[in-house]
Image: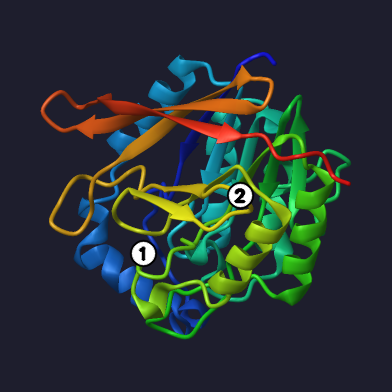
């Protein structure tokens, strides 16, 4: 197996000044705009996004995964801005995204929202309407799961739903033998976020991963970096979460960071996963090394 490198970051919350018309003010967007003007525009910074983009591109990863909350208010102009930014990361075939709760803040006409991102969240066969999508890169299978649904004001939870869960189980089984990476916005661990922000059917998702098998889960949504081990079939499933990739470190946010992942064959029956953390350093106004670790993952037995 040739080593595969993957850059993962989440919740870039691309800075965008909300200018709401009267219809948009009668929606959940008004609360988000109030939060932005009150505190978040001082936290989610253009200069950090610019440095993040440059740092990731300089690493020259084989693939980039972005696990949601690319926007703040789900405004049509934000989706257009985000599409232009995604194009700067690399070819669409080399960048995979899933939406977050801020990308589904309100119910939208697809033409004004996610359809502008279809190049980055579709299966290899071009299907853009059938979640979860699957992208196979050699011995790596990237599987994008949609947990983003509109919710009531003050709520930021997610839901996958029975239909998508069943499809995910079938697609994980079909990719057995490859290194399967699930991309999803919301955390899977029970205590990762408050109840109002949690994934409603996370227990059902964990059950699917345990039955079908999965080598790695990547997510965002929490304001701290996380490493959780989920119950698996014969071995724990590593679940890595990251805070906002554009956030200045503060009392509520751990600060911007991203992971440089390298997957390689350790032997005929296992993989080696090396994870290097890149963190925003305010004094130097740049991303710097934040340490690394190595994890070994046993290859599953072939399907009967």
Residue 159 appears anywhere in the view: no
Q: Is residue 191 left or right of residue 233?
A: left
Q: Is residue 299 left or right of residue 12?
A: right
Q: Is residue 37 left or right of residue 145?
A: left
Label 2, label 1: how many angstroms apart (C-alpha)?
24 Å
The answer to whether 25 is drawn above or below residue 232 in the figure is below
Residue 192, label in figure: 1
Picture residue at 62% right of the left edge, 48% below the top: 182
Residue 273 location (% of width, % of height): 50, 28
Residue 29 location (% of width, % of height): 44, 74
Secondary structure, mark 1, is loop
Labels 2 and 1 touching (C-beta < 8 A): no
Secondary structure, mark 2, is loop
Between 224 and 202, the residue placed more toward the observer is 202
Q: Is residue 83 left or right of residue 251?
A: right
Between 47 and 151, the residue placed more toward the observer is 151
Mark 2 burial class by Cα count in 10 Å: few <14, some 14-19, many 20+: few
The answer to whether 163 is drawn above or below residue 212 in the figure is below
The tally of labels here is 2
Picture residue at 67% right of the left edge, 27% below the top: 269
Picture residue at 70% right of the left edge, 40% below the top: 300
Residue under label 2: 234
The answer to whether 289 is drawn above or below residue 169 in the figure is above
Between 124 and 46, the residue placed more toward the observer is 124
The answer to whether 232 is drawn above or below residue 269 in the figure is below
């Amino acid at each position: 197996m040739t080593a595969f490198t993957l850059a993962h970051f989440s919740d870039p919350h691309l800075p965008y000044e909300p200018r709401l018309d009267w219809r948009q003010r009668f929606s959940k967007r008004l609360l988000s705009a109030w939060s932005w003007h009150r505190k978040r525009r001082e936290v989610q910074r253009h200069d950090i996004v610019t440095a993040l983009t440059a740092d990731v591109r300089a690493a020259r990863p084989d693939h980039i995964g972005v696990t949601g909350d690319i926007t703040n208010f789900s405004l049509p102009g934000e989706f257009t801005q985000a599409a232009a930014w995604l194009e700067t990361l690399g070819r669409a075939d080399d960048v995979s995204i899933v939406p977050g709760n801020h990308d589904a803040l309100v119910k939208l006409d697809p033409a004004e929202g996610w359809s502008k991102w279809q190049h980055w969240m579709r299966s290899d066969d071009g299907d853009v309407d059938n979640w979860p999508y699957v992208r196979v890169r050699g011995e790596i299978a990237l599987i994008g799961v949609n947990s983003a649904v509109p919710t009531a004001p003050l709520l930021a939870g997610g839901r996958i739903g029975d239909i998508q869960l069943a499809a995910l189980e079938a697609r994980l089984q079909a990719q057995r033998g490859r290194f399967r990476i699930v991309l999803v916005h919301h955390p899977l661990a029970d205590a990762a976020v408050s109840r109002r922000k949690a994934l409603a059917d996370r227990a059902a998702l964990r059950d699917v991963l345990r039955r079908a098998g999965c080598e790695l889960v990547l997510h965002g949504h929490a304001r701290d970096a996380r490493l959780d081990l989920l119950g698996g079939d014969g071995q724990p499933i590593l679940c890595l979460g990251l805070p906002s990739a554009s956030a200045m470190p503060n009392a509520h946010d751990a600060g911007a960071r991203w992971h440089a992942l390298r997957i390689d064959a350790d032997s005929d029956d296992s993989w080696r996963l090396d994870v290097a953390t890149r963190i925003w350093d305010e004094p130097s106004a740049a991303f710097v090394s934040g340490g690394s670790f190595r994890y070994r993952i046993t290859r599953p037995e072939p399907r009967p």
